[in-house]
Amino acid sequence: MRWNLFFVLLLSGTTAVFAQEDPRDAYLNTPDSLNIPIELEEVVINPNEVTVDAEAVKIYNRLQRRVYKVYPYAKATSATLLSLNEGMSKMKTARERRKYFKIVEDYMQKQFEPQLKKLSRKDGQILVKLIHRQTGQTTFDLIKEYKSGWKAFWSNNTARMFDINLKTKYAPYEVNEDYLIETIIVRGVKAKRLDPQEPKVVVNYDDLSAYWIKKLRAERKKKT
């Protein structure tokens, strides 16, 4: 699998998106030993064709830290949802299902609510995307399907804190940031810095990367 600079070049138009104003983003400015640094030999295809933008690399590394921070919560959501559905299918009565759901709800709240409150708005936006990637459902759909505790947990603690669109889907072929997120996850799993979990939104990364390379080359050709 080839790693290349095209994702860095694509970042050149996204700098404003990552402006740091939320105090909960302070962690982005501290040293992080888990980051996978971008090496020039990884990203430069033709040194005469592209210029490495140091600010773009910094932006990418910050996005990587965000993904590393929220990916475990998306994984936990997927695992809990699977466990919840399996458990609910074994319940014989509505009363048993409600009781079981309450147990799962209480566990989720105690386990993750304190950490979720520390997330910034941008962290929350990425979390919503990754929940869709891992579960195949938007956070909005999860709230709609699991109305009681699920609604209270995500609606109150996510949407209220982050003021984000809970209908957001993970779309790596349409949204550049999502392509970068996929790149970060694939690299993180390969480097054993992220634990793998099969996503519901399955993407062939080689095809995805080729798509963005072709798109970028076409856009650059138009400008010449």
Image: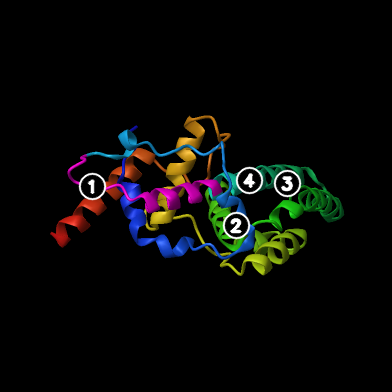
What is the C-alpha distance between the residues marked 4 and 2? 25 Å
Residue 192 higher or lower than 180, as above or below: above
Element class at badge 4: helix
Question: Would you say residue 47 sits in the magenta stretch?
Answer: yes
Q: Which mark is residue 25?
A: 2
Q: Mark 4 points at which residue?
A: 78
Residue 213: where, in percent of width, then height? 27, 47
User: Which is in the foreground here, disc 4 or disc 1?
Assistant: 1
Give whichever of 192, 37 is nearer the camera. Answer: 37
**Which comes before the other along the chain, label 2 or label 3?**
2
Amino acid type shown at disc 4: Ser
Which numbered disc flags the more N-terminal residue, 4 or 2? 2
For image coordinates 50% across by 58% down, the residue present is 169
Quadrant where the N terminus is found in the figure: top left
Which residue occupies the foreground of this view, 63 or 177? Answer: 63
Q: What residue type is labelled 2?
A: Asp
* Of labels 1 and 3, the one closer to you: 1
Q: What stretch is highlighted in magenta?
A: 46-65
Q: Nearer the viewer, mark 4 or mark 3?
A: 4
